[in-house]
Amino acid sequence: MLNFFFMIVMAVQSLSNIIKSSLGPQGLDKMLVDDIGDVTITNDGATILKQLEVQHPAAKVLVELSQIQDREVGDGTTSVVILAAEFLKRANELVKNKIHPTSVMTGYRLALRESIKFIQNNMTLSVDSLGREALINAAKTSMSSKLLGHESEFFSEMIVSAMLNVKQVNEAGEVKCPVKAVHILKTHGKSIKESCLVDGYAIEAGRSAQGMPYHMDNAKIAFIDFNLNKYRLAMGVQVLVQDPENLEKIRQREMDVTRERCKKIIDAGANVILCSRGIDDFALKYFVEHNCIAIRRVKKNDLRRIANCTGGKIVVSLADFEGEEHFEESFLGNCTKVFEKRVGDWDYTFFEGMKATKAQTIILRGANDFFLDEVERSMHDSLCVIKRVLESNQVVPGGGAVEVALSIFLDDYARTLGTREQLAIAEFSEALQIIPKTLAINAAKDATDLIAKLRVFHNASLKAEDEEKKQLKYSGLDLVNGKVRNNLKAGVLEPAISKIKSLKFATEAAITILRIDDMIKLAPKEQEDPRRR
Ligand SMILES: Nc1ncnc2c1ncn2[C@@H]1O[C@H](COP(=O)(O)OP(=O)(O)OP(=O)(O)O)[C@@H](O)[C@H]1O
Ligand SMILES: [Mg+2]
């Protein structure tokens, strides 16, 4: 069993070693090349792990772990894997010293419970007391480790404004900030500083015919999810025509069916038509005559979102129960302004002043696809961070402050227990220090020295009576100067929920793997040969 567990720890450790160097503001990026030569350059833990070819089943648990963190929190995907790997490494040492895995698991669970309580009671700060500055700082911290790091001032403003604009409070008084309401569009050309925030939704498509207006006030939008092409009889239907004149009539009727459909849509009051499929030229002509904007081949996702935001309904077919066709006014969505504008090499259509919910669009500019893709991922991380901060309203200082404070607290706590779980808790507390240690190593600073200093500060704050000394609990690393500073004042903030969840997920993943004591390879299932029946 020992040998088996050793193999697991080796696999997990090698995975964590791959992403260790990308942690923190001074962390480096990875270039991933797949078998057809596609290149991804990224710093995001979840993206790196998702693309790796992982064979060991235990290592796959860690890949899954980073995906969960990405889905639930959005940021902290690198830290969570490093933490879980360290928990396992230390558990392995304990098991080697004849401590039963069950005791280790109990100890880890206890340590987790106490840590969460400690973070909630001692380390969190409410955003209301810190103001908008805290939001900007949280966005900056999450961006600092990415390509965008040096432009963080510009982008954090943009992200915070976007999230504040889509913020809603529902009937129960809960704050909701849907990240999906912020749409990110990537366009080649110009520099990253030329990116902009648009108050509304934008899609990557222009008007389908030149004669249509560029601009429409008080737009009533129809969302069509069927072809507005010439009507054709279904496959396999045969029509026998004896008089050649009738043939012409059939052709005319085929055109008229679509024309009538267009007329019904226009009569209902629509002046902007978004169609997810094709629109024939003669139908376009009809729309031009009525001074409407029609856009064909709009992406399904865009159609759905604009319909949601404007209070419209996607129409799949005009048929009603009586077998007739009709289009109601209630299917239309409303927004104050629809217009087409050229950005870079592409035409975009903008929708502003949506009726139902607000939407925001960030148009990113940049030199190439690798760059734009990575910027989009970083933006997504920061948007998620702001969402968490706005929804839970609590932040904690970053740069290793929480980890070291917890470590000191757990050391003390372990000493109050007279059971063998004490050892597991002590190891848990040691394992937490891997985060500040890796941060310092990546910044080419003396990790041992810095952590010793940090521990002194946090120890002093835990024992302190007066308020001034208690402030030392916000001490964290200054990775540029290689010093210890008050990270609350320095503005290195992270959402509290992100720290709590990553601790939870990392411990749970470590426990899942710890519970395994053997791996059994199953023989492949024999597939029944259908010919043998
Ligand atoms: N200016 C800073 N000074 C000190 N520490 C910082 C600073 N900015 C960020 N950090 C720390 O860096 C760590 C985050 O690093 P990073 O963003 O590379 O990884 P992650 O958030 O775990 O994963 P990912 O962003 O890839 O999902 C956090 O522990 C944070 O406290
Ligand atoms: Mg991050």
Image (spheres, rainbow, N blue to C red):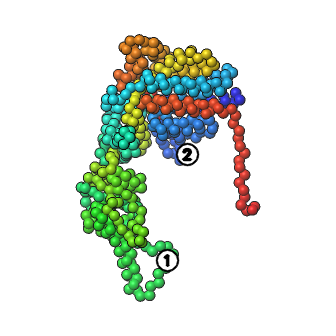
Q: Position of residue 338 (x, y in %)?
A: 28, 54
Residue sitting at the far right: 532
* Residue 8 visible in this rendered orientation of the protein: no
User: Mark 2: few, some, or many residues within 10 Å (few <14, many ≥20)?
Assistant: few
Nearer mark to the viewer, of 2 and 1: 1
- The residue positioned 62% from the left and 33% from the top of the image is 513
Q: Position of residue 35 (x, y in %)?
A: 55, 45
Q: Position of residue 503 (x, y in %)?
A: 51, 29
The three-letter code of the residue at mark 2 reads: Asp
Looking at the image, residue 149 sits to the left or right of residue 525; the answer is: left
Quarter holding residue 231 = bottom left
The answer to whether the residues at label 2 and label 1 have Cβ atoms under 8 Å apart is no
Looking at the image, residue 259 sits to the left or right of residue 460; the answer is: left
User: Mark 1: few, some, or many residues within 10 Å (few <14, many ≥20)?
Assistant: few
- The residue positioned 57% from the left and 32% from the top of the image is 508
Per the rendering, the mark at residue 509 is: none
Q: Secondary structure at mark 2?
A: loop
- The residue positioned 30% from the left and 55% from the top of the image is 334
Q: Secondary structure at mark 1?
A: loop
Quarter holding residue 137 = top left
Q: Earlier in the sequence, mark 2 or mark 1?
A: 2
Residue sitting at the far bottom: 243
Q: Position of residue 108 (x, y in %)?
A: 58, 25
* Residue 448 visible in this rendered orientation of the protein: yes
The three-letter code of the residue at mark 1 reads: Val
- Residue topped by disc 2: 35
Q: Is residue 108 above or below residue 381?
A: above
Looking at the image, residue 244 sits to the left or right of residue 62; the answer is: left
**Mark 2 Cβ and ligand 1 under 8 Å apart:** no
